[in-house]
Amino acid sequence: MPNQRCSSARDAERAAQADHQPNGYTVSVSELVGGDHSANSRHYVGVALDINVINGSHVGQRRPHAAAMAACRALGRTEVLRPGDAGHSTHIHCAWPRP
């Protein structure tokens, strides 16, 4: 679902699964538009999602997630953040361009 706005957490989960399963990943989406994000966050316009579990393992500092991040970028995400980036210690943030 590249460059497509997600209207619900269910849409986001479906989009993430559809995008990542062909690349060998099963993911869980933890945030779409809820939660506490920066005032200018793409979450608030429905074009960002946070992935907190990849192939059954929680995302964190010591977990391998570089390949999943590369898959996000290859699928058209233009903003990809990870543990180590401020406010992202437990998830990967993947966002499409703003509408």
Image (cartoon, rainbow, N blue to C red):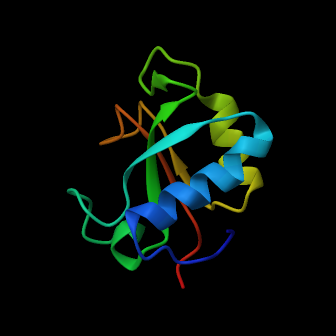
* Whole-percent x, y for residue 31 in the image: 35, 54
The C terminus lies in quadrant: bottom right
The single residue placed furthest to the left in the displayed view is: 36
Image position of 67 (left or right of 41): right
Up/down of 8 relative to 50, above or below:
below
The single residue placed furthest to the bottom in the displayed view is: 99
Up/down of 40 relative to 66, above or below:
below
Of 19 and 14, which appears nearest the observer? 14
The answer to which image quadrant residue 20 occupies is top right
Up/down of 29 relative to 6, above or below:
above
At 37% from the left and 67% from the top, the residue drawn is 43
At 49% from the left and 73% from the top, the residue drawn is 6
The single residue placed furthest to the top in the displayed view is: 62
* Whole-percent x, y for residue 75 in the image: 74, 57
* Whole-percent x, y for residue 30 in the image: 36, 47
Up/down of 13 relative to 28, above or below:
below
Image position of 19 (left or right of 65): right
At 67% from the left and 68% from the top, the residue drawn is 1
Of 19 and 78, which appears nearest the observer? 19
Image position of 97 (left or right of 38): right
The answer to which image quadrant residue 65 occupies is top right
At 62% from the left and 50% from the top, the residue drawn is 17
Q: How many marks?
A: 0
Of 68 and 21, which appears nearest the observer? 21
